[in-house]
Amino acid sequence: MTNKMISGKMTTPVTIVGAGLGGLTLARVLHVHGIPATIYEAESSVEARAQGGQLDIHEYNGQLALKAAGLFDEFLGLIHQGGQATRVLDTHGKVLLDKSDDGNGGRPEVLRGDLRRLLLDSLPPETIQWGKKLVAVAALGDGRHKLTFSDGSTVCTELLVGADGAWSKIRPLVSGAKPEYVGTTYIETYLYDTEERHPTAAKTVGGGSCYAFVQGKGILAHREAGDIIHTYIALNRTAEWIASIDSTDATATTARIAAEFDGWAPELTALITDCDTAPVLRPIYALPIGHLWDRVPGVTLLGDAAHLMSPFAGEGANLAMFDGAELGKAIAARPDNIEAALSAYEMALFPRSEAAAAEAHQNHELFCFDDRAPLGLIDILNGSLEEKNDRPVQF
């Protein structure tokens, strides 16, 4: 594919579907290199919904992406100090592991919403077209594609990037793979004003992350900025069991989930029963480990669209940003030969995402929910399994 160029710079905009962290990082890195991009986002505005909780940004991928985007110094100002502290408890509330945040963990915690805002503010306002829900995409030949949005508008593009998440509408252009339920569902809850209103929970969780696991179930709580505790209750249950829960009845849902933890310490079950928000069910899906595709002219994927995996390696957001940065750099290095740029990007994308997906699966299956739990999790957090990897194990 040959793109229009003036004085060595592309003038044909890169079309990105999805204004998540990966798509925004791609647009920012392109902007740094003087390459135009337009992001089409289904949400009506930046404030359309909450952006989730805290992320640990790894020094070997997420932080590298922020450096490529020229935003690393600003990122440092967003860090939740003390957020890398980690505790593991047994079901009786006994502390089995308590690691403080010494500032050297290589994975500082930031709020997803703050990180997204940093990326948004770094882009020209016209970069993002809000309220553009993609309903159809068609190949036109010669690497060109036509996008149709729910408002009836259409766009034709010579370079299309699917950054549109787990249920990507761009993915079918290159792959027939579909996400499958991994057998685990998260139930999300929040506690607010914890020091005053939930002091026992605040003391139990501490200043960072707190985990309590047995075979097939667990509680994962994170202290967030603003005196908030954000909790995920994890259950290994069938899709049918999860579907049988009437999530519109918050009281009944809370009672049913709490019943799965009968006999656990009250300071742990209070993270379920005392929640200040209605519980939200989030079944976990993943693409096959090693998901890849043959080169299709004019289109590629990044982030969850390319390699959706379970969250048990803590790599989803980090990889999405790293993908975006690497793709942006590849395009900038070969602006006159986009197919070569996309090929180079994908050749590196496939092995790194396969390794991360395999790690996430390993952590999920062998260490977090098996009959040794929580001992396997303690092994991970202590780093005793690092010799099996060429970088430190993360969770």
Image (cartoon, rainbow, N blue to C red):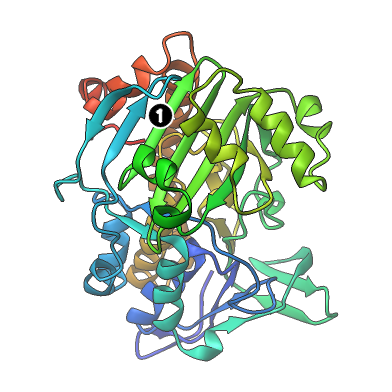
Residue 136, quarter of the rendered image: bottom right
Residue at 82% x, 48% y is 248
The residue lying toward the viewer, choosing from 284 and 88, is 88
Looking at the rendered image, the quarter that the C terminus falls into is top left
Residue 151, quarter of the rendered image: bottom right
In this rendering, the count of numbered labels is 1
Residue 50, quarter of the rendered image: bottom right
Residue 63 rendering spot, x and y as whole percentages: 27, 58
Residue at 37% x, 69% y is 334
Looking at the rendered image, the quarter that the N terminus falls into is bottom right
The residue lying toward the viewer, choosing from 372 and 288, is 372
Residue 187 rendering spot, x and y as whole percentages: 63, 40
Q: Which residue is mark 1?
A: 359
- Residue 323 visible somewhere in the drawing: no
Q: Secondary structure at mark 1?
A: helix
On screen, residue 26 versus residue 152, left or right, reads left
